[in-house]
Amino acid sequence: MLAAERRREILRALNLDGAVRVTELAVQLAVSEMTVRRDLDAMDAEELLRKVHGGAVPRHARGEEPSASVKATQQRAEKAAIADVAAGTVKDGATIAISAGTTTTELARRLRHRSSITVVTNSVTVFDVLTSPSSDGADAPQVYLTGGVRTPSDALVGPIADAAIASFRVDATYLGVHGFDPEAGLTSPNIAEAQTNRALIGIGAHLFVLADHTKYGEIGTNVFAGLNQVDTLVVDNGLAPADRAILSRLIGDIMVADVAGQQ
């Protein structure tokens, strides 16, 4: 079993049980306790969990949302690769919606010189990326920012955001997620953000979900869509082939972004 697969199984066990023990993980994964400890050390450094004596516990409670600054430090290579692939799907002249999230912010960075497109977003960060003056004077997309209440992920949510979003129709929605799971679907720890994500999904003709492999099996408290509503999933190659096969039965199109050193 590759390291990425082990760590995904560790996160899945942590999500189900609320805590994991080194001894039990070693048996479950058929590896040495030293290997498990190294995995936990690496995952703690990436702030995916918090290592404690004899095991690990979640770094964030299921109902707690990490800040945008914390999430921005995690899986940088995966997010960049996913954004590269997603940017290639945006056609000239398109009107698109982009949700809040660190991966969707990476997508915005790749679209800031696409002057022919129009973007609707509820993300303060995405708006800043797309509208900041360019050093080379290149034209930027036309961007509409919703109002609303700001969350720790820099999303604008609530009735004002939902009403603004509902006034648009877009060719595609590009959505970042807290977690995606075959049974639970797409989830968020923030109930208002979950509702605003539903609004973003509702205005789009095609739903793209941008999520790195560590989001697989992560389940927040609020479900806002089933995986059968996703038209295209853009994920990195850290997601195991077996898990891709499971997802392919629910999602019609899975685009895999290659990250060096992963399977």
Image: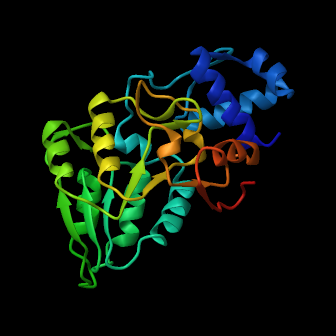
191 sits left or right of 30 in the view: left
Q: Nearer the viewer, residue 136 or 52?
A: 136
Indicate how the structure is coloured in the image.
rainbow
Q: Residue at x 64, y 37 (%)?
A: 42
User: Residue 106 placed where, x, y %?
Assistant: 42, 60
Q: Nearer the viewer, residue 53 or 127?
A: 127
Q: Residue at x 56, y 15 (%)?
A: 18
For residue 253, what is the image quadrant? bottom right
263 sits left or right of 173 in the view: right
237 sits left or right of 226 in the view: right
Task: Determine if residue 51 is in view.
Answer: no
User: Residue 196 placed where, x, y %?
Assistant: 27, 40
Which quadrant of the rendered structure holds the C terminus? bottom right
User: Residue 98 placed where, x, y %?
Assistant: 33, 56
Q: Residue at x 46, y 47 (%)?
A: 73
For residue 11, what is the image quadrant? top right
Which quadrant of the rendered structure holds the N terminus? top right
* Vertical relation: 63 (above or below) 255: above
Q: Residue at x 33, y 35 (%)?
A: 194
User: Residue 91 placed where, x, y %?
Assistant: 40, 75
* Vertical relation: 159 (above or below) 137: above
Task: Determine if residue 238 is in view.
Answer: yes
Marker count (numbered): 0
* Vertical relation: 67 (above or below) 79: above
